[in-house]
Image (cartoon, rainbow, N blue to C red):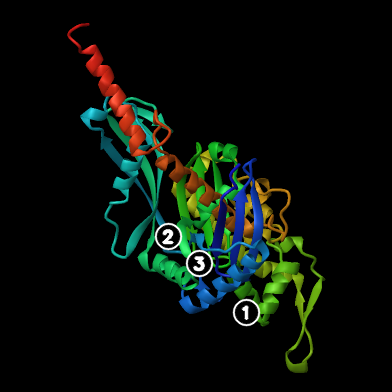
Amino acid sequence: MEEPEIIVGLDIGTTKIACIVGRINEYGKVEIIGMGRSESLGVRSGVVSNINLTVESIERAVSIATEKSGVEIGEVVVGIAGQHIRSLQHRGILTRKSKDIDEVIEQKDIDNLVEDMHQLVMNPGEEIIHVLPQEYIVDNDHGIKDPIGHSGIRLEANFHIITGKVNAAKNIYKSVSKANLEVHELVLEPLASSEAVLNEEEKEAGVVLVDIGGGTTDIAVFQDGIIRHTAVIPFGGNIITDDIAAGCSILRKHAEQLKIKFGSALGSDSMENQIVCIPGFSGREPKEISVRNLANIIQARTEEIVEQIIYEIKSSGYEKRLIAGIVLTGGGAMLKNLTQLVEYLSGLETRIGYPNEHLGKANTDDLGSPMYATGIGLVLKGHELNLKRQKREKPKRSLIRSGSKDKQGLFDRLISKGQSFFDDDDI
């Protein structure tokens, strides 16, 4: 048997950079061979702002992953996010050539249609990141999910097109290249996260993925198994930390610790008389902070983020068709009582999305946490893209196993002799 292909996902986030080395086992699960994590120093709101600092962070994460996995890392599947991401709907049309009419629709026809979409003229400074087919129409026959095998002349498709700023993508490529790596594929982060935490039933029923990172909150709406809407909100867990630091007049590192250990998205759920002590500056008296006040600060900002999420859900036009509700993932999803607050404000059933379902048994490093959903999703996306490439490049079946010229020539000569034999006037 062939060894499973090793895929490396590189999640360049606002607070952390995670490098995950994995492969897909025979059961379709991700086996993590090694993982490296480092603090992200050059990224703001999901966008690379300082290339040199980002390179250093990438190199640290990759070095740790290399040491743990024993794999020399060369190519990586990288995530992209940020406020610059936007999406649009577009319809593509392909009229098949007369010589192809007698043949059924093949993958090459779909590839040609997708390639046409990549030629669309974007606004200055923007480029297309993904072209995602939604549903197909063959000779006015609507609602076809997979047109391969259908017979028809006119092939149409509705596409969900995701675009981003050219400079943002270039900075990612530069950072990865300077770290002596090559970008195998650039993938929108909410698409990667959805691969890790959503199942096909949820996508079919209608679901909203909400990935709450440090600098951004990424949203993807699925319905009838198709992606319908994507958006990136420029707020995440870091803005909550900043509010705590400002509201309690403490250092940011202490604010982050308070949020993780004692934070809650519901002020009413916290005990009014519970007090937490924070070390004072330069020998000064410790600072006392009420847990109830802490939760009130967190709730105020969290409600603002949730309202933005609800706005995007309404903008998608699928608000009334989301049977599976909302799935929260990312590091920010681990905030206590967040699911209750989201359910209360949105009226939709909400759960936390863990990537455990796609992980093999022998994995360590607490990779089942929502904060690693994007990284694991990038490995899954890399595997999916590899399978599609292999399908396209698969050679057509030949009568002759060997591709040598001598054997091909022999085959041609035998055919030629057979033809001359049957053309003989004596027969």
- Three-letter code for the amino acid on which mark 2 is drawn: Ile
Residue beneath label 2, please? 85
Most foreground residue, 290 or 412: 412
Report x, y in % for residue 319. 51, 44
Q: How many neighbours does mark 3 have within 10 angstroms: few (below 14), some (14-19), or many (20 or more)?
A: many
Q: Is residue 142 left or right of residue 185?
A: left
Report x, y in % for residue 423. 20, 13
**Cα gap from disc 1 to disc 3, whole angstroms:** 22 Å
Identify the residue shown where x is 80% and y is 66%: 271
- Three-letter code for the amino acid on which mark 3 is drawn: Gly
**Cα gap from disc 2 to disc 1, whole angstroms:** 29 Å
Q: How many neighbours does mark 2 have within 10 angstroms: few (below 14), some (14-19), or many (20 or more)?
A: many
Identify the residue shown where x is 51% and y is 72%: 43
Most foreground residue, 427 or 292: 427
Say which element carries label 3: loop
Closer to the N terminus: mark 1 or mark 3?
Answer: 3
Q: Is residue 4 left or right of residue 52?
A: right
Residue beneath label 3, please? 46
